[in-house]
Every structure is written in structure tokens, then in C-alpha cells.
Image (tube, helix red, strand yellow):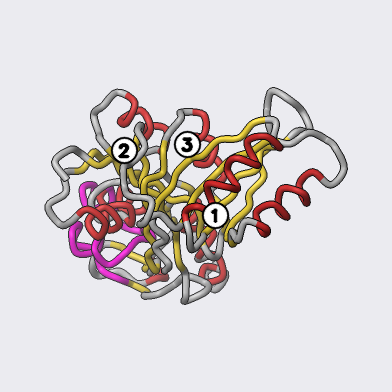
């Protein structure tokens, strides 16, 4: 891809890994230290596409990213899954007993909290990005400080792996979505997954009715996430992922849901990466 791809994090991050696996090794990156900065990179046309983590098999949904996609009218053009392998990194020549503080992204800390219960002397501190902490340790030659990151970050920033595979659940998978400001143009024959958002009134059974419509239209519900509407207390938006065999089935469901829901939006139509 000729344009830059925005990622949350820097070289050596898991977003970097996804960008290379999805777009190819020669991809040009725009490194951003927050998901808000990722979106800004798209909106100001610094980047043509972006990689955003959306959910993890251990920690669950990254809810703010649903809001960023919705509020900024972004389009999901694809998805990618990776198995996340967390490692404890530090400057060479130290042991775990020498480490007093470990910095990492909040999701990484959450995924490794059981490991650190063995080491109560280590203070866990939230930070912007896994690989950025590794770079900071390398640049400042910071002793007594650890990072949670992948093996690529250890190689890039010349750090030693003090403990491998420290995530609580070894089969730790993260789903990433590829987003743009414009919808993609793949053929309907290729599309077998979609992400939609809808809002419903307070009428009893309204959500059940919508789910029944999806079932009747032969859609398989793979994800449902509710998000409160800040401007309207106690009302919620529902973000739903569905898969299907025939695009016509999804097209039929779209036409019905657009009538039933008080607000209905398609965030993306793309290929199912799990198929």
C-alpha cells in the first residue's frame, strides 16, 4: 500500500506486527501514541488507513475504540487476528528481583496480572504503549525498570527477556480492525462479515425482536457490545458483528433494521478473517 498506515504505538508494537502482516513488510507507518492520534492521522489525511485493536480474548472489548469509529464516521474495511505473546523485558544483566517498576499499556498489564502476583515488590504502572516503554528503557539505559512487550521489541531495542509468555491465558488472541475514512470497494461476493450499530427505543422486547430478524435473515451474531449514549442518560447504542454466507441475506436484514431501529449505521462490510 502506497499511503501511510497509522498504528497505535511504535516499531515493535503489536499494531506494527498487524500492519506488516495485513499490508506487507514494506508498509510505511505513522506512529501514534494514542488511538485519538490514530484517528486524527486519518482525518487530516496523514494516513490512508489505520490499524486499531478492538477486542481481546482475555480483557474483552476496547470500548473507547467503538466510540471513536462511530463518532468519526470511520469505515471498517477488514480485520486481523494475532496471538499475543507477552514477555517481561529489561536491560541486560538484571534479574526479576532487580526490577522495581514495570510499565505497559493497561490491556497488557491486565492480561499479565496473575504473573506479577508472584512479585509483590514490582509496581505496575500504566503507560501509552508496550514497545514505547521498551524504547525508553533502551534510550535512557533505565535499570530496575521493566516493559511488557513482544520479542520483536526486545530485538529492536536490545533488551533481555527475563520471562517469556507471561500472559495469564496462553491462547491470548486480539482482534484488530482496519479502518479508513471511506468505505472499501470489494465485491459483494467477497463480503461475508459486517459491523453495524443501531439504537432502540425503550419498548419491551425491542432488542429481542432485532436479534430475531438477524436470525431469520440467516445472520450469525459473533459480537454484541452496548455503549451508553452520553448525551441521553440510560439509552444505549448497540454495536454488532455478524457473519453470513450470502450477501443478499445481509442486504435484506439491513433494509428491515433500518426501519426498526431509531438509528442504524453500517460501520463496515468486509471479509471474515476467521473463515
Closest to the observer: 103 or 197? 197
Q: Residue at x 33, y 57 (%)?
A: 14
Q: CA–CA distance between discs 1 and 3?
A: 25 Å
Q: Residues within 10 Å of mark 2 (few under 14, many from 20)?
A: some
**Which residue has dot 2 on it?**
32
Start-end of magenta stretch: 136-161
Secondary element at tag 3: helix
Is residue 250 left or right of 156 when viewed as pictured? Answer: right
Q: Nearer the viewer, mark 1 or mark 3?
A: 1
On the rendered structure, is 228 left or right of 87? right
Q: In the rendering, at what x and y percent does residue 207 appear? A: 76, 47
Corner quadrant of residue 97: bottom left
* Residue beneath disc 1: 249
Mark 3 or mark 2: which comes first in sequence? 2
Mark 3 Cα-neighbour bin, 10 Å: few <14, some 14–19, many ≥20: some
Question: Residue tagged by mark 3?
Answer: 69
Amino acid at each position: 500500500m502506497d499511503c501511510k498506515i497509522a498504528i497505535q504505538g511504535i516499531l515493535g508494537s503489536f499494531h506494527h506486527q498487524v500492519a506488516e502482516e495485513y499490508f506487507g513488510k514494506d508498509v510505511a507507518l505513522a506512529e501514534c501514541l494514542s488511538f485519538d492520534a490514530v484517528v486524527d492521522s486519518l482525518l487530516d489525511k496523514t494516513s490512508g488507513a489505520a490499524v486499531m485493536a478492538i477486542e481481546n480474548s482475555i480483557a474483552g472489548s476496547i470500548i473507547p475504540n467503538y466510540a471513536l469509529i462511530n463518532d468519526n464516521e470511520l469505515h471498517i474495511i477488514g480485520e486481523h487476528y494475532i496471538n499475543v505473546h507477552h514477555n517481561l523485558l529489561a536491560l541486560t544483566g538484571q534479574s526479576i528481583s532487580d526490577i522495581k517498576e514495570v510499565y505497559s499499556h493497561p490491556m497488557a498489564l491486565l492480561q499479565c496480572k496473575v504473573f506479577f502476583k508472584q512479585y509483590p515488590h514490582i509496581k505496575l504502572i500504566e503507560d501509552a504503549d508496550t514497545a514505547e516503554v521498551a524504547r525508553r528503557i533502551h534510550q535512557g539505559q533505565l535499570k530496575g525498570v521493566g516493559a511488557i512487550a513482544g520479542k520483536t521489541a526486545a530485538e529492536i531495542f536490545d533488551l533481555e527477556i527475563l520471562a517469556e509468555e507471561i500472559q495469564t491465558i496462553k491462547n491470548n488472541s486480539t482482534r484488530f480492525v482496519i479502518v479508513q475514512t471511506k468505505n472499501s470497494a470489494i465485491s459483494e461476493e467477497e463480503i461475508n462479515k459486517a459491523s453495524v450499530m443501531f439504537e432502540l427505543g425503550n419498548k419491551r422486547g425491542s432488542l429481542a425482536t432485532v436479534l430475531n430478524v438477524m436470525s431469520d435473515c440467516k445472520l450469525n451474531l459473533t459480537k454484541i457490545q452496548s455503549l451508553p449514549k452520553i448525551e441521553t442518560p440510560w439509552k444505549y447504542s448497540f454495536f454488532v458483528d455478524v457473519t453470513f454466507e450470502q450477501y443478499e441475506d445481509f442486504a435484506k436484514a439491513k433494509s428491515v433494521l433500518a426501519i426498526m431501529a431509531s438509528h442504524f449505521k453500517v460501520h463496515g462490510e468486509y471479509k471474515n478473517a476467521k473463515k
